[in-house]
Amino acid sequence: MVSHPHSDPSKSTPAPNDPSEELPQTLKLLLIGSSSVGKSSLLLRFTDEVFLSAEESSATIGVDFKVKLISRRGKRYKLSIWDTAGQERFRTLTSSYYRGAQGVVLVYDVTSRESFESLPSWFSELDTFTHSPRDVVRIVVGNKTDKDYSRMVSNEEGRAFAADNNALYAETSAKTMKGVEEVFEAVVDKIIDTPSLHHKGLNLRSNRTTTLPGTINLDDDEEEEAGWCSC
């Protein structure tokens, strides 16, 4: 179950027969957090319903990109989901990665105190590139709840941290898929309920040409910034 910092009973309802609703609206979501917390596993679980063990998945350097079509409140949305794919180890993410994002999933491992304690630095980086909490929906996700016997961060502590940072909160297990879909659905619902972010998605779709799944296209309006390690 996703925890919301503030309840907002109002729901945004698109105008009937609005031509802009004929095609799926594109929403850009990001996954960030320390290495080995399960970001790529969450992404694969959500988009492909596949789980790879640590032995099966090897860390890659660069950006992983997935597309997922979902329906919320009778409308279709195309989620463009970006994963740092190991790049966070070098702390060289640039504004190109964050630019245009409407939702950010900040992931930590509930069995790793270190990954939880690194979250403030991730929020700081996010603030640097997004300028204001109103610019993007944020959700803190405690992953690997299937290893509850090794838990180092309680649900209550994670929930309190998220609330202090004006973020949604959820716990997941990429291995069992528990809570995975709910995370992305909660982010989309919050974007829908935030007019400025919802309209950003409409502008994203109308101003950009279609990008095929697997294509790296961080920004269409400006030159791609340096900072991605190809090693």
Image (cartoon, grey):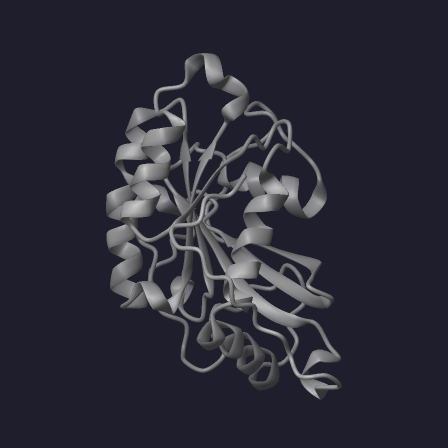
Query: Residue at position x 71%, y 67% from top?
Result: 76
Residue at 48 percent across and 45 percent down: it is: 85
Query: Which residue is most to the top?
Result: 149
In this rendering, position of residue 112 left or right of residue 17: left
**Left or right position of 122 against 105:** left
Q: Residue at x 50, y 18 (%)?
A: 147
Where residue 42 sits, quadrant-wise, is top right
Residue 160 locus on image (x, y percent): 31, 38
- Residue at position x 60%, y 52% in the image: 185
Q: Is residue 217 above or below residue 32?
A: below
Rendering coords of residue 222 (x, y %): 41, 80
Of 101 and 191, which appears nearest the observer?
191
Residue 178, above or below 74: above
Residue at the limit of the structure toward the front, as seen here = 9
Whole-percent x, y for residue 184 in the image: 57, 51
Residue 227 position in % (x across, y down): 33, 60
